[in-house]
Image (cartoon, rainbow, N blue to C red):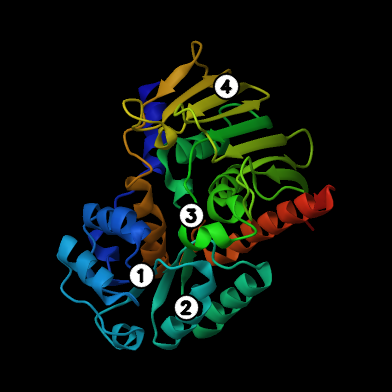
């Protein structure tokens, strides 16, 4: 049985071959870059040449904290640096398209922040532009590379629990939505639940139809709690509950997938408070292996910061091998279409189809 678990761990590998590594520069020096991208790339042994941010002091602080050799005075200066091959974007979605276009024009490949765009039409346009320019565009949906999520996906692909018939995921956390987030009339799905939705798509693909309701316990422009359902062909049905309004400190993240020959259950410890936070907890109950009851899978890496290596790893592998990765912008258009359908369901109170 240990050998079978090792097969799963190999599919969760986040190491980057030396021959795949190319010089990177950050665009944006905010919290997500400082707390996730920068430490993840350092851990992976990647070569980060510098950073540009509209706030020069913030860029300088990031460069100092991570011993980056250069801060760029402008985006043009960064794009003119022939040593930089990859532009790593960490800015709000409304600012991304122009940066991506300019990076392509400068001959750079791009790792974009999620959401790639706030419309599927614009996302599709960027994919078409990448194709026309011969450039690679990947989206930073790092939850797919969180070990509990990635291992679950591999178990499903290998048929360990037969055909998936039902899945549920519940995230109960607290987020203090500040800055430009607080001004968004569409909030939780675009800027948090999109993680879970993309992870679910990585397991099962795009659903046929969806429904969703969203609300908030405080006066707010956007939803801070959602409940939704995803309907797939055949027997598979998926439920997702996400709340960012936990007021009692007992935050949690749990999921379960039931199949015709077993089940997988897990805890996303990224959402837990100390001392429970840490690597995910994952178990499988399989009649096809078979297991003797619930068999633990030993997760050893974490969402923060290990999973952030995954999207950059996939982009570098795409450049090296020509094989388009699961987190390419082309695939991501369907995640954005799913988000749009959920917002339509909230607005009209009806089931929405995705065709």
**Residue 28: mark:** 1
Label 4, label 3: how many angstroms apart (C-alpha)? 31 Å
User: Quadrant where the C terminus lies?
Assistant: bottom right
Label 3, label 1: how many angstroms apart (C-alpha)? 17 Å
Quick check: can you spot residue 163? no
Which of the 4 image quarters holds residue 257? top right
Q: Does label 4 or label 1 sit earlier along the sequence?
A: 1
The x and y percentages for residue 313 are 36, 58
Residue drawn at point x = 73 percent, y = 39 percent: 229
Label 1, label 2: how many angstroms apart (C-alpha)? 13 Å
Disc nearest the viewer among 1 and 2: 1
Q: Nearer the viewer, residue 68 or 216?
A: 216
**Residue 141: mark:** 3
The x and y percentages for residue 35 are 30, 53
Q: Nearer the viewer, residue 101 or 8?
A: 101
Residue drawn at point x = 50 percent, y = 81 percent: 98
Element type where label 3 sits in the image: loop
**Label 4 sits on residue:** 288
Q: Residues within 10 Å of mark 2 (few under 14, many from 20)?
A: many
Quick check: can you spot residue 264? yes
**Residue 41: mark:** none
Q: Nearer the viewer, residue 311 or 13?
A: 311
User: Quadrant where the N terminus lies?
Assistant: top left
**Label 2 sits on residue:** 100
């Amino acid at each position: 049985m240990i050998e079978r678990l090792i097969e799963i761990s190999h599919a969760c590998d986040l190491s980057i071959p030396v021959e795949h590594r190319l010089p990177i520069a950050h665009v944006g020096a905010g919290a997500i870059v400082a707390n996730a991208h920068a430490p993840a790339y350092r851990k992976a042994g990647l070569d980060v040449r510098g950073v540009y941010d509209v706030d020069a002091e913030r860029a300088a602080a990031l460069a100092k904290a991570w011993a980056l050799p250069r801060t760029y005075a402008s985006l043009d200066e960064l794009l003119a640096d022939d040593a930089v091959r990859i532009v790593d974007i960490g800015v709000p979605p409304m600012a991304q398209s122009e940066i991506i276009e300019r990076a392509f024009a400068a001959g750079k490949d791009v790792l974009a922040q999620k959401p790639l765009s706030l419309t599927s039409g614009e996302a599709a346009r960027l994919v078409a532009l990448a194709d026309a320019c011969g450039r690679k565009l990947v989206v930073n949906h790092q939850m797919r590379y969180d070990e509990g999520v990635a291992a679950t996906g591999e178990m499903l692909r290998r048929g360990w629990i037969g055909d998936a018939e039902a899945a549920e995921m519940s995230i109960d956390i607290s987020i203090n939505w500040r800055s430009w987030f607080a001004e968004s009339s569409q909030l939780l799905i675009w800027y948090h639940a999109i993680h879970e939705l993309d992870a679910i798509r990585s397991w099962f693909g795009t659903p046929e139809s969806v429904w969703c309701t969203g609300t908030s316990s405080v006066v707010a422009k956007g939803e801070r709690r959602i409940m939704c359902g995803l309907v797939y062909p055949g027997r598979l049905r998926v439920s997702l509950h996400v709340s960012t309004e936990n007021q009692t400190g007992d935050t949690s993240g749990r999921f379960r997938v039931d199949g015709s020959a077993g089940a997988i259950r897990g805890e996303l410890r990224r959402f837990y408070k100390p001392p429970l936070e840490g690597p995910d907890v994952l178990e499988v109950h399989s009649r096809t292996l078979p297991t003797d009851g619930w068999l633990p899978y030993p997760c050893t890496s974490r969402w923060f910061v290990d999973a952030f290596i995954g999207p950059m790893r996939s982009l570098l592998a795409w450049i090296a091998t020509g094989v388009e990765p699961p987190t390419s912008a082309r695939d991501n258009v369907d995640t954005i279409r799913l988000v749009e359908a959920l917002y339509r369901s909230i607005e009209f109170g009806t089931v929405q189809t995705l065709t």
